[in-house]
Amino acid sequence: MNPAQTVSLEYYPPRDIAAQERLVRSAKRLSALNPAYVSVTFGAGGSTRAGTVDTVQMLQNLGSEVAPHLSCMGASRADLQAILDDYQARGIRRLVALRGDMPSGMGGDTGDLHHASELVAFVRERYGDQFHIEVAAYPEMHPQAQSSEHDLQHFVDKVRAGADGAITQYFYNPDAYFHFVDRVRARGLDIPVTPGIMPITNYTQLARFSEMCGAEIPRWMRLRLQGFGDDKASIRAFGVDVVTQLVAQLLEQDAPGVHFYTLNHADAVAQICANLGVR
Ligand code: FAD
């Protein structure tokens, strides 16, 4: 890892006291990695609004630079402005701006803004350069996109609307990332595209997530993981090994850093970073 490359971490708002205690333990332990920032997810439709703010505050109290995620799905302009004003007052300087997906069962009103590009433009129009804005990128294409070309064009649109950087959906095939970055550069965009890294600790959960978000688990990995059955220790050991190799290759080939989807657990991320000599 060269000095310009960064580690950042994603957490989500815990749902109960036990989960909150686990998050605090994980965040304290992973702060040893000196993350450039930590991000906190936001449930579209405002479903985790209070939990996101509480988690942002807790992580700020631990001394981290925090980037709340903000999704426009289901929100009015007034809702978004109230959240952004609150973040501004709390000294937040970084956001991850998303469209989001409406949680099942919430249905109804999709809100005033319909694409992440509109949210980025809204933040820039009302807050100028006060926030550093990251957006989502999909090396293996967003599952609802009409085509890979349309998806790339929509990505270009949200960068041109004012994004400073992008974090990718997770992937296990590094070529998908390198190819995506080449296509972004060919469109004349030089923003950092940071790979999102999903550690592997639970195959059933990973397979379900991947089905929903369109991230491919390569066949050889799927077969190995399936072959471990309920042997959690072997799944974890294999996962740490595979993801360490993936991150090493991405960093060697000049990715600007890595953003770990921690799922509020420290072990796998700490182990991968230790393997790579990241302190
Ligand atoms: P967009 O960039 O708006 O794209 C969504 C889809 O619409 C794509 O298929 C795109 O091609 C298409 N599109 C875009 N613009 C147009 C247009 N003008 N016309 C037609 N089609 C268009 N979800 C959450 O709910 N909370 C989170 O905290 C969260 N954090 C995330 C963090 C990262 C790093 C990533 C990669 C994803 C995250 N997600 C989160 C998931 C994300 O909200 C979903 O993938 C969602 O479906 C798309 O959000 P987006 O911001 O990428 O949307």
Image: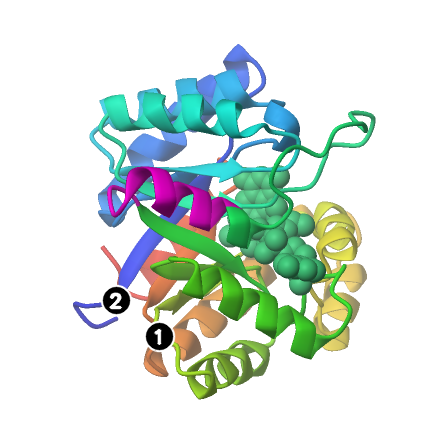
Q: How many marks?
A: 2
The mark that comes first in sequence, 1 or 2, is: 2
Q: Position of residue 91 (x, y in %)?
A: 22, 28
- Residue 251's disc is 1
- Verify whether residue 239 appears in magenta: no
Label drawn at residue 265 = none
* Side of 133 where 114 appears, left or right: right
Residue at numbered disc 2 = 5
* Residue at the spot 53% in from the left edge and 76% down from the top edge: 177
Q: Do the numbered discs 1 and 2 sit on residues whose CB atoms are within 8 Å?
A: yes
Q: Is residue 256 above or below residue 47?
A: below
Please tell me how crowded label 2 is: few (under 14), some (14-19), or many (20+) other residues with Cα within 10 Å: some
Q: Is mark 1 within 8 Å of ligand 1?
A: no
- Give the residue type at disc 2: Gln
| Quarter residue 199 falls in | bottom right
- Range shown magenta: 119-131
Residue 66 percent location from the top left of the image: 31, 36
Residue name at image x 68 percent, y 73 percent: 150
Residue 72 shows in this picture = yes
**263 to the left or right of 25:** right
Q: Main secondary structure of the magenta part?
A: helix
**Is 18 or 231 nearer to us in this picture?**
18
Question: Can the viewer see residue 139?
Answer: no
Q: CA distance from mark 1 to mark 2?
A: 8 Å
In what element is the residue under mark 2?
loop
